Image: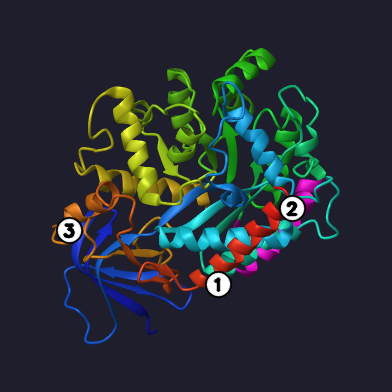
């Protein structure tokens, strides 16, 4: 069999940086050989500094449509909860074609920013009045189309949202587009499974949160999905806000993570999004399940969520990855930088993310995020290795943050020294070039659609 290949002068593998690396993949975009310390082939693609693609383990695509537009005072003391009302008002106006336009532009941005796959936590299911579309999968098809057209790897996570608060409180009027019974969600899931399989997307499930799905329906949902795919990823928002923790204690007598671990079959297939407010017992018990924690540092900062205790989680060998969540920032590098800096603010120390194996903070954080993100996505995207997708990111050795640096410093320059510019030159998913010269190949078309979408929405009063 003749494989496609790329020769990298330097490549970041799971064991660290290696020189003169030949990476070969098959017609399905799966890596079949990785060989270091070899001579460059006479023909074929070459790269200077090559990284594994970064999985984005948490995204609400539609929220990119109003990024930056909630930064004004809504009340005497704004919070996540007042922001949420603005988000709901925006979500109420989005049509399926507008969802596709937003997601297409967002996924093109993600690829240019170093994300090669995304877990889409999707809950805008119905028409604005809450009535289902004739095709219940219409909104999901918009996201599948956007992923296919841009080339980003997709884990689609249709969200089950049923209640307005703990204890089965009724949903608010602006939440009606989200509401699905367990039976509706399982029927939708069964409909989506062949659609995802046809374009090599992964299908998982997302009970939105403990406040939005009651215990009986949570158990039925997880059991129903596992009967169709025992390995399906399961993602849930949990312990993001102090109020959420307080409300959960008032409802159940337990903190949310503790309640979940006691009442649900949490294991390595689960991703606990945010998990910001845990006590030491919850950190230890959650890490022991093998579940991934989904950290979204730029969104957690934007919404005033709080700071995750990274050293405590790592001390329990906890797994983690990064997500762009509200998509106010679309940059894998900036998520890692914000994670590190938030720890420094909190602990008044430096270089928190470094490890004994990787004293370079950027390298340690990057490799951990790739590994945890791949696990949460349920896809074979765990780095430049045999059996994984040929998802790769090339740094631009001419960029000011990288130029002239030894290879072990190049990633540090990209993450900590790029001054919000991008040091990324090219990006591949499944061995296919998607970004060249720091621009997605569909950039102009995708951007025009995004701009037109925003004109339509704001002309209509969004």
Of residues 262 and 274, the one nearer the viewer is: 274
Helix, strand or loop at disc 1? helix
Render colour scheme? rainbow
- Single out the mark in the foreground, 3 or 1: 1
Determine the CA span between mark 3 and mark 2.
Answer: 51 Å
- Single out the mark in the foreground, 1 or 2: 2
Residue, x 72% and y 40% (percent of image)?
A: 221
Determine the CA span between mark 1 and mark 2.
Answer: 23 Å
Q: Residue lying at the far bottom in this picture: please name it.
A: 42
Q: Residues within 10 Å of mark 3 (few under 14, many from 20)?
A: many
Q: Going from the N terminus, do you reach mark 3 or mark 1 first?
A: 3
Task: Give coordinates of residue 303: x percent, y percent.
Answer: 52, 33
In the rendered view, does 392 fall on the left or right side of 82?
left
Residue wearing tag 3: 407
Residue wearing tag 2: 460
User: Is residue 24 magenta-colored?
Assistant: no
Of residues 188 and 82, the one nearer the viewer is: 82
Residue, x 64% and y 19% (percent of image)?
A: 248
The magenta span reads: 184-202
User: Is residue 201 magenta-colored?
Assistant: yes
Task: Give coordinates of residue 169: x percent, y percent.
Answer: 78, 25
Residue, x 36% and y 58% (percent of image)?
A: 383
Give yes or no for contact between labels 3 and 1 (Cβ–Cβ under 8 Å): no
Q: Residues within 10 Å of mark 1 (few under 14, many from 20)?
A: few
Q: Residues within 10 Å of mark 2 (few under 14, many from 20)?
A: few
Residue wearing tag 1: 445
């Amino acid at each position: 069999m003749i494989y496609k290949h790329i020769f990298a002068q330097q490549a970041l593998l799971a064991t660290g940086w290696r020189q003169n690396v030949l990476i070969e993949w098959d017609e399905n975009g799966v890596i079949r050989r990785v060989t270091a310390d070899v001579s460059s082939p006479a023909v074929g693609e070459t790269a200077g500094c090559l990284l594994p693609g970064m999985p984005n383990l948490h995204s609400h695509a539609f929220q990119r449509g109003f990024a930056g537009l909630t930064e004004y005072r809504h009340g005497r003391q704004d919070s996540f909860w007042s922001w949420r009302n603005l988000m709901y008002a925006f979500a109420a106006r989005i049509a399926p074609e507008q969802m596709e336009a937003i997601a297409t532009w967002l996924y093109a941005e993600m690829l240019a920013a170093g994300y090669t796959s995304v877990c889409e936590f999707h809950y805008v299911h119905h028409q604005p009045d809450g009535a289902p579309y004739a095709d219940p999968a219409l909104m999901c098809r918009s996201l599948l189309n956007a992923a296919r057209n841009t080339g980003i790897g997709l884990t689609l996570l249709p969200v089950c949202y049923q209640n307005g608060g703990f204890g089965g409180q009724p949903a608010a009027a602006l939440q009606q587009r989200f509401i699905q019974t367990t039976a509706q969600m399982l029927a939708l899931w069964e409909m989506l499974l062949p659609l995802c399989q046809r374009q090599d997307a992964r299908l998982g499930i997302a009970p939105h949160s403990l406040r939005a799905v009651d215990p009986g329906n949570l158990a039925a949902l997880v059991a129903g999905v596992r009967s169709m795919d025992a390995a399906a990823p399961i993602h849930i928002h949990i312990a993001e806000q102090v109020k959420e923790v307080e409300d959960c204690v008032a409802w159940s007598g337990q903190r949310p993570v503790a309640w979940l671990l006691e009442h649900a079959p949490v294991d390595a297939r689960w991703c606990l999004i945010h998990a910001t407010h845990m006590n030491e017992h919850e950190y230890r018990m959650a890490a022991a399940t093998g579940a991934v924690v989904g950290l979204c540092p730029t969104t957690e900062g934007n919404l005033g969520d709080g700071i995750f205790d990274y050293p405590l989680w790592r001390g329990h060998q906890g797994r983690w990855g990064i997500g762009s969540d509200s998509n106010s920032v679309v940059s894998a590098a900036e998520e890692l930088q914000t994670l590190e800096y938030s720890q420094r603010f909190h602990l008044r120390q430096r270089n928190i993310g470094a490890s004994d194996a990787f004293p370079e903070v950027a390298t340690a954080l990057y490799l951990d995020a790739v590994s945890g993100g791949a696990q949460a996505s349920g896809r074979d995207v765990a780095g430049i290795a045999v059996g994984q997708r040929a998802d790769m990111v090339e740094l631009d050795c001419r960029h000011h943050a990288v130029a002239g640096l030894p290879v072990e410093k190049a990633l540090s320059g990209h993450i900590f020294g790029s001054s919000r510019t991008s040091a990324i030159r090219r990006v591949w998913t499944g061995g296919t070039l998607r970004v060249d010269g720091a621009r997605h190949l569909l950039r102009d078309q995708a951007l025009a659609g995004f701009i037109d979408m925003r004109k339509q929405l704001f002309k209509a009063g969004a």
